[in-house]
Image (spheres, rainbow, N blue to C red):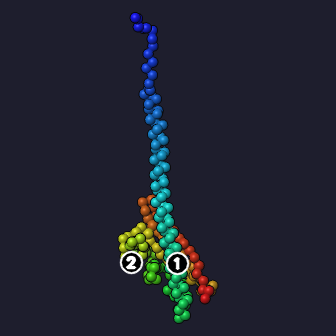
Amino acid sequence: MRLNSNKKYNNSGFSITEVVISIFIITIGLVGVLSLVNQNIKAQFINKNNLIASQLAQEGLELVRNIRDKNWLDPANPWTFDIIANPDGNKIYTIEYDGDINEVTGIDDQAAELKITGGYYDHRSGDDSIFRRIITTTNDFAASLTNVSCIVQWTDRTGTYQYVADTILYDWR
């Protein structure tokens, strides 16, 4: 038996150029996916902190509203008692859930820093948090109303952010 010497062997495979191009395309795809994952993680932290800040700001407004309502129950106090102390009708302060009020100079004041204990935020005790909260009130004596603004600020690894919630309180007693 004789071997066919005219038979061609098909040694097909990938050339080095094809391998390099394939690796390049796969790398570009993985870089895109990793970039998307990184952006989603950043957005998650920003959204989480923004949600916490919005709730802290709303809590601040509700605490001021609670003081106003307590003032209405005591006829000896004007409705703005403890809400407005300055003769010009402006006040910057921190407030606690028990109604404790402390005047501060601004959001950068050390007393504006919120602490966290057992999931609750306050200005007095606990572990340091990234949040600061102040309340500003401006009284319009002629219209019998008070503008209340709660500012919550936080700094994380991506920057400094602020959440502001406003309301108007009226003397409808």
Residue beneath disc 2: 124
The answer to whether residue 6 is above or below residue 19 is above
Report which quarter residue 172 is drawn in. bottom right
Q: Return the x and y of residue 31 as percentages of the image width and height.
A: 46, 44
Quarter of the rendering containing residue 19: top left
Q: Residue furthest top?
A: 1
Outermost residue to the front: 1
Q: Residue at x 40, y 74 (%)?
A: 110
Which is more toward the observer, 92 or 4? Answer: 4
Q: Earlier in the sequence, mark 1 or mark 2?
A: 1
Rendering coords of residue 58 (x, y %): 52, 73
- Amino acid carrying label 2: it is Arg
- Residue 124: x and y in percent read 39, 77
Provide the residue designation for mark 1.
62
Question: In terms of secondary structure, where does tag 1 sit?
Answer: helix
67 sits left or right of 113 in the view: right
- Mark 1 surroundings within 10 Å by alpha-carbon count, few (fewer than 14), some (14 through 19), many (20 or more): some
Taking the spot 48% from the left edge, 67% from the top edge, the residue there is: 52
Secondary element at tag 2? loop
Residue 144 position within the rendered picture, expressed as x and y whole percent measured from the top left: 61, 86
Mark 2 is surrounded, within 10 Å at the Cα level, by few (under 14), some (14 to 19) or many (20 or more) other residues, namely some
Q: Residue at x 51, y 84 (%)?
A: 67
Dividing the picture into quarters, in which one does residue 6 lie?
top left
